[in-house]
């Protein structure tokens, strides 16, 4: 029999046991609570390297230094843009009301002391709530807006008044000595047509003072509102009495006993005639 060894009779090679797991460097040296903080704040791959752990801890400490001494209640986390509820809660910490009713903008006053229009105030409050504006900031912004509105209104009024004065002066030149009589006719026409003063004022703004007064004067002439101020002699006064002519007419009427009787009884024609003549005499339409 040869010297070959039968494999079946060869004892098996004993297995090499795996190496015992290496304990982390911080095992038994750092409290489990601190290890848990590291695991939550430091990437797992870096925990095995004490140098990297020290680097992360140093960075975390430097970032926290700026908040040292600040109460936790005063620290807020900036929400992500898509977090609508979180954004609303964030701004509420800075004074944004829960809803539009919390702005109380209706309590604000205009420069002249008048209240804001309720619908206008509600619209502003809803806009402020939509953009989560803190209440003090919204109230201050609206107050400044009202000041600008008031300043713009004053500026517009000054410009309008200046234009009216310029047009009135031009109209005086155009009407020359017939200013009082023509103005009387124009105003009588507006009254006869039932046009309120505010409508006349709006017409003056739209088409100009001179054109408005000339329009009503023409209407008054057509409907006979000039009958009491016409110069019966015509001539240079273009059918309109002068102040002196009106004074002479009043003296004439006062000497007419029948006319005086009708006037004292309150007859409308006599009353209107005396009123028109007094307008020319006293310049009451100026």
Image (spheres, rainbow, N blue to C red):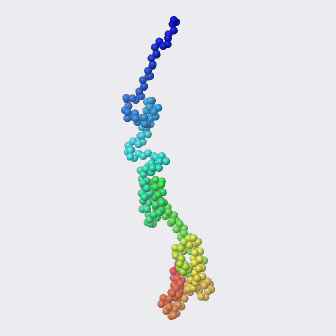
Q: Which residue lies at the image location 46% right of the left edge and 58% below the top edge?
A: 125
- Where does the image place residue 243, in percent across and percent down from the top left? 55, 84
Q: Which residue lies at the image location 45% right of the left edge and 63% below the top edge?
A: 118
Left or right, 168 with respect to 146, comes to right
- Residue 182 in view, yes or no: no
* Nearer-the-camera pick, 149 or 244: 149
- Where does the image place residue 132, in percent across and percent down from the top left? 46, 53
Left or right, 4 with respect to 66, comes to right
- Residue 47 in view, yes or no: yes
Q: Residue furthest bottom?
A: 257
Q: How many labels, in total? A: 0
Q: Residue furthest right?
A: 235
Q: Which residue lies at the image location 41% right of the left edge and 50% below the top edge?
A: 93
- Where does the image place residue 6, in percent across and percent down from the top left? 49, 11
Q: Which residue lies at the image location 44% right of the left edge and 66% below the top edge?
A: 114
Task: Indicate the quadrant where residue 51 lies.
Answer: top left
């Amino acid at each position: 029999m040869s010297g070959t060894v039968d494999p079946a009779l060869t004892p098996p090679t004993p297995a090499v046991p795996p190496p015992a797991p290496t304990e982390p460097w911080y095992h038994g040296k750092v409290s489990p609570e601190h290890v848990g903080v590291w695991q939550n704040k430091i990437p797992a791959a870096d925990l095995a390297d004490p140098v990297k752990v020290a680097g992360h801890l140093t960075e975390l400490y430097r970032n926290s230094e700026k908040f040292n001494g600040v109460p936790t209640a005063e620290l807020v986390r900036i929400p992500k843009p898509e977090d609508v509820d979180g954004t609303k809660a964030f701004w509420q910490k800075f004074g944004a009301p829960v809803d539009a009713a919390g702005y109380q903008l209706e309590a604000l006053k205009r420069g002249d002391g008048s209240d804001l229009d309720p619908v206008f105030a509600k619209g502003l409050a809803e806009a402020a709530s939509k953009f989560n504006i803190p209440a003090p900031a919204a109230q201050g912004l609206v107050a400044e807006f009202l000041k600008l509105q008031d300043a713009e209104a004053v500026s517009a009024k000054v410009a309008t008044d200046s234009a009216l004065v310029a047009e009135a002066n031009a109209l005086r030149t155009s009407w020359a000595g017939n200013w009082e009589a023509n103005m009387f006719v124009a105003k009588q026409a507006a009254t006869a047509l039932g046009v309120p003063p505010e409508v006349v004022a709006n017409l003056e703004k739209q088409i100009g003072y001179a054109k408005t007064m000339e329009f009503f004067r023409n209407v008054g002439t057509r409907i006979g509102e000039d009958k009491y101020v016409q110069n019966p002699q015509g001539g240079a006064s273009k059918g309109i009495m002068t102040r002196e002519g009106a004074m002479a007419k009043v003296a004439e009427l006062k000497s007419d006993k029948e006319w005086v009787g009708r006037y004292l009884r309150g007859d409308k024609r006599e009353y209107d005639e005396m009123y028109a003549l007094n307008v020319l005499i006293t310049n009451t339409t100026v």
